[in-house]
Image: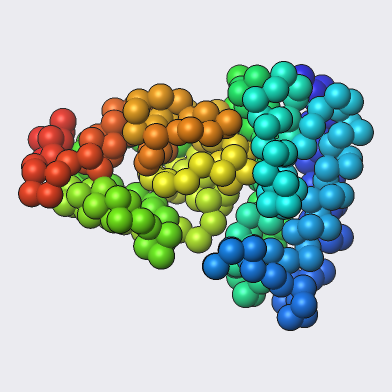
């Protein structure tokens, strides 16, 4: 595990890289600086440069570690295999919210997490234009700009509960069935733009719950530890913890407690027209 000074060094280096390689390009990207990896999945020159810079300094800080970065995996999916190995792994998303970054929204962040043997050890969420720096260390709590974070109080039931969901354009047919069933409980849905900042908002108690339908580790690793250290609970549709190496049954519920997560997942599994039991008597 890293020492206190090493943890602080990572925080400052993420801020530095963001300040030198990402922020100066905000609102100044040329057409050639933005590419589409897949329909609707953007990458910019800033993503590539920041990931390379972070990778170099993190490997130097922790000899014997490996880096699993979003753009490196896009170029070579075999990079993901490091998540199955024994070495410490740095999981890096240089710009979480690339679409926001490329289209002029300040709602983007750099996400970094350190894991080993599938266990998250430390995480960083840095949103430079919003002046937000969130950090977490396993067993030591979660902090935003040095203030301790706590998740929202568990709700009495699902009706009216604010639940963040992926935008409908990312839903498949089964996602649509699940989320439409969830809507039947009377939740208050919102469709999020970037997972890293939503995890931060959940950890800070500004939002209550989230459901996700994908498992790319760089989108979730930093936020999962931040949320857990703020007192939150995450589980898959099978009732298992989220596995960084993949194979997670969908959807995954991120909630203030286990009972709320399980109610959300149960609602998603209901058949059309089937009433959903609400343990607070709101079903």
Say how the picture is coloured.
Answer: rainbow
Q: Looking at the rendering, in which quadrant would you find the C terminus?
A: top left
Depth order, front residue of 25/250: 250
Residue 158 coordinates in the image, percent (x, y): 23, 42
**Left or right: residue 140 compared with residue 214:** right
Q: How many marks?
A: 0
Residue 104 coordinates in the image, percent (x, y): 64, 74
Identify the residue at horizontal 70%, vertical 22% (top origin): 85
Spot the residue most to the right.
Answer: 60
Depth order, front residue of 153/7: 7
**Image position of 239 with respect to 46: above or below:** above
Quarter of the image where one finds residue 282: top left
**Left or right: residue 109 compared with residue 189:** right
**Image position of 248 with respect to 184: above or below:** above
Spot the residue most to the bottom.
Answer: 31
**Image position of 50 with respect to 113: above or below:** below
Quarter of the image where one finds residue 81: top right
Identify the residue at horizontal 8%, vertical 42% (top origin): 275
**Left or right: residue 121 compared with residue 252:** right
Residue 171 coordinates in the image, percent (x, y): 37, 57
**Left or right: residue 242 compared with residue 84:** left
Quarter of the image where one finds residue 40: bottom right
Please indicate, yes or no, whether residue 226 appears anywhere in the rendered image: no
Identify the residue at horizontal 51%, vertical 42% (top origin): 215
Residue 117 coordinates in the image, percent (x, y): 65, 19
Depth order, front residue of 261/159: 261
Q: Looking at the rendering, in which quadrant would you find the N terminus?
A: top right
Please indicate, yes or no, whether residue 170 appears anywhere in the rendered image: yes
Identify the residue at horizontal 37%, vertical 41% (top origin): 251
């Amino acid at each position: 595990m890293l020492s206190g000074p090493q943890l602080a060094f990572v925080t400052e280096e993420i801020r530095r890289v963001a300040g030198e390689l990402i922020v100066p390009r905000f609102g100044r990207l040329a057409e050639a600086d933005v590419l589409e990896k897949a329909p609707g999945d953007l990458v910019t020159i800033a993503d590539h440069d920041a990931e390379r810079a972070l990778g170099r300094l993190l490997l130097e800080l922790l000899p014997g570690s490996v880096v699993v970065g979003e753009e490196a995996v896009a170029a070579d999916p075999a990079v993901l295999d490091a998540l199955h190995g024994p070495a410490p792994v740095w999981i890096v998303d240089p710009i979480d919210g690339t679409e926001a970054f490329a289209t002029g929204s300040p709602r983007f962040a750099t996400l970094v997490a350190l894991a080993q043997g599938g266990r998250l050890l430390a995480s960083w969420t840095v949103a430079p234009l919003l002046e937000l720096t969130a950090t977490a260390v396993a067993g030591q709590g979660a902090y935003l700009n040095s203030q301790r974070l706590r998740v929202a109080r568990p709700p009495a039931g699902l009706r009216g509960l604010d639940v963040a969901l992926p935008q409908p354009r990312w839903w498949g047919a089964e996602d649509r069935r699940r989320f439409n069933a969830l809507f039947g409980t009377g939740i208050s849905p919102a469709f999020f733009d970037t997972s890293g900042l939503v995890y931060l908002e959940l950890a800070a108690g500004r939002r209550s719950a989230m459901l996700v339908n994908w498992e790319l580790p760089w989108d979730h690793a930093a936020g999962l530890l931040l949320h857990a250290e703020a007192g939150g609970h995450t589980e898959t549709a099978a009732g298992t913890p989220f596995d960084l190496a993949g194979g997670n049954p969908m959807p995954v519920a991120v909630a203030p407690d286990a009972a709320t997560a399980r109610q959300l997942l149960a609602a998603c599994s209901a058949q059309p027209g089937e009433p959903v039991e609400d343990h607070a008597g709101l079903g």
